[in-house]
Each structure stands twice: as structure tokens, then as C-alpha cells.
Image: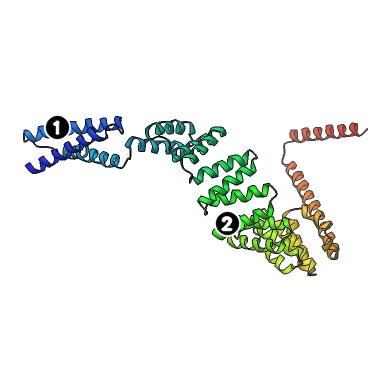
Amino acid sequence: MILEKISIIFISCAMISFLSLKFVKKDLNTNLAIISLSTLFIASYITFAINKAYIPITFQILIFCFSIFLPTMAVVLQYNNIIISSKILYLVMKFYYKAKDYQKAIEIIGRLVLLEGNNSKYLYLLGKCYNGVGDNINARDCFSCSIEVNNNDYKSYYELGILMDETNNKNAAINMYENALKIKPDFYEAWEALAICLTSKGLFKEAVDVYKKAVSLYNDSFEMYYNIAMIESELGNFDSAIDAFEKAGNIKSDLYMAHFNLGKLYAMKKNYDKAIEAFTKILNSTSYGGVGYYNLAVMYANKEEYQRAMTTLEYAMELDEKFIKEADHEYSFNPIRQMIEEYKKAKEKEKILRMQKQNFMQQRFRIFKPKQELELEEEQDTFEKNILIENHA
């Protein structure tokens, strides 16, 4: 027991001495608080030990925590240049940053810089915070300073590129994205941003080359394959566009725009079977279902399968009446023009019958209305008829 008490007192005094003599200046406020707590608890323990008094288990745990564990942890952390108060501040700053309270985060980063000096991590986060409050000038300066402190800060290169891109300084933006990719070749966002920037400059071939390099690293990116296909279509490289649309659609089966564009390209090449296969994949879409049925009808008409064309066209016209007008101008439907006209007449009759039924139901409801209410309705009808006659005259 005596040896145990002596060990506790010795370890506690040693840790307090280390903090007091070697590390107190590193984090003055935190170390003074730890030294005060540790001294208080070890003094209490010595008093109990001298008087051979019973120490409750709860108080023993507190003595161990505050007189041995806490100062020992402080010594270990500061020996490795980890400042406790700055770590706490950093966690608080990250909380505000994630909560998008950028002004609070900026204030805490300022305190962190005073504690630890400039480093690229804090400068990058400061730039993101300034960007979050719309202060692009300070954001740009922070990202630039971060790169000066750390030439390998690829995130700051990327963020500078975004800022340059937004101010239409495309060449500088391209340079920033390329610098980021030199440091981190698998930086997905930088590849995508670089390709988009090149596309906005009209450098379509260069953009395709960038996308192709990127998909060699990210072969499961349907977005990049889709963008390749769109640019290749613009350049007239239809075979390459078809290949890219197919890859995008295979990766993401509900990428309906890819299937639709694929169908249009196959139709242009008069490969109607492949076009039908592509258009069939968009029928379940709430947005493209009607378009899918309409284009399927055109494909069947081109294949001279007129009955299937008419059946499919009816589906399209039921989903959206605009396809009735579009069908009137579609050359492929000339052989089924008579069937289309019969469908339109049937729809017109159906509409008239529906209106008649509605009027009949209104008349039936009138029977059950009070006499006074019916008289008021008749007066209103008479008044409206007189107004119409006067306007016509």
C-alpha cells in the first residue's frame, strides 16, 4: 500500500513538473488549468495518505484521472507538438463549418493561426469559408497563400480553378486544374471541371481527350461517358457517341436521356432494331415515356410494321395530346394516315359524349335543388345571355 501511494505521488509530481518546466509556454492557459487541477487532487491525496484516512472509490478515480491520467496525456500530446486547446478549437471550428456558419468558423480559424501559425490546412479552410460568405477576393488570397505554404495542396489549386472559371478566366482555370491533377492524378472533380472548362471554350476534341483519360481511372462514371457521347455527337463522331451512350446506359439503367439519344443516333443510321431496343428502355419513365412510345411508333412505321406503329402511337397520344399534332407532320406515318384520322374522330366523339354526360348529370342535380335556388340560376342564365347578345350587337 505504501509503495502504491508513493508511486502515485511520484508519477503525478513528475508529470506536473514536466508541464510546469518544459511545456507550459506551448499552451499556457490549458497547461495552467491542468497543473492547478492536478496539484489540488494530489495535495488532497497526500493529506489522506499521511492521515491514513479511507479514500472513497469515486474520489480515488477522480484522483487518478486528474493527478495522473490528465497530466500524462498533456505531456504526451505536447511532446508530439499537439496542442490540446487548438485541437478543441479545431473540432469546434469544423462543427461551425459543417453547419455553414462560416463567420464563426472564420473567427475560430483566426485563433488557431495565432496558436499554431499559418499552415495550408487552415488557409484552405479559411478560403472555403470566405467562399461560403461570397467573399471571393479573400477566398482567392487564402487559396494562393495555402499553395505558397504547401506546393502540393491540390485542393487549393482546384478551388482557385473554380474561382477563375466563374470569373471567365478560363485559361488560368485550366492551368489550376492541370496543376491539381499533376499532384493528384485521381482527382475526379478536377478531371470533370477541366473537361467542362475546355468544352465551354469550344475545345471539344481536347475536352474528349480529358474525359477519356478520366474514364480510364473511373470506368464506372456514367456522367463522363454521357458527356463524351454528347461532345462526340456534336463533332459528328456518331459511332464513338453510340459507344459512349451505351456504356453510360449500361452503368446507369435509368439514365433515360442516354437511351433516348442512343435511339436517335441508331434511327439516323437506319438501324431500326437497335433504335427500338433503346427507345423501349425509356417507356417506364414518367418524363420520357410518351416520347419513347412516339419514337417507337416512328421506328415501326419505318420498318413497315404499320399495325404495331399505330398501336404504339395510340399509347403516345393517350399519354400526351401533343403527339396528335406531331403525328400530322411525320412523313413516316403517311401509310397509316387514315388510321390516325379515324383515331382522332373517335377521340372527338368520346369528348362530345363526355361533355353531354357531364351536362346531363348537372341537369339531374338541378331536380334536387330548392325552387328559390333554381329561380336564381335561371335569372343568372338570362342575364348572361342578354350580355352576350348586347356584345354581339
Residue at image location 80% in from the left, 35% down from the top: 378
Q: 313 or 299, which lies in front?
A: 299
For the residue carrying disc 1, how many other residues have a C-alpha within 10 Å: few (<14), some (14-19), or many (20+)? few
Position of residue 125 in the picture relative to residue 331 (left or right): left
Label 2 vs 1, first from the N-terminus: 1
Q: Position of residue 293 (x, y in %)?
A: 72, 60
From the image, tell me which residue sits under label 2. 214
**Amino acid type, residue under disc 1 in the picture:** Ser
Q: Position of residue 296 (x, y in %)?
A: 73, 63
Q: Position of residue 367 (x, y in %)?
A: 74, 42
Question: Residue 59: which quarter of the image?
Answer: top left
Question: Residue 218: which quarter of the image?
Answer: bottom right
From the image, tell me which residue sits under label 1. 44
Residue 262 visible somewhere in the drawing: yes
* Helix, strand or loop for disc 2: helix
Position of residue 17 in the picture relative to residue 200 (left or right): left
Q: 146 or 12, which lies in front?
A: 146
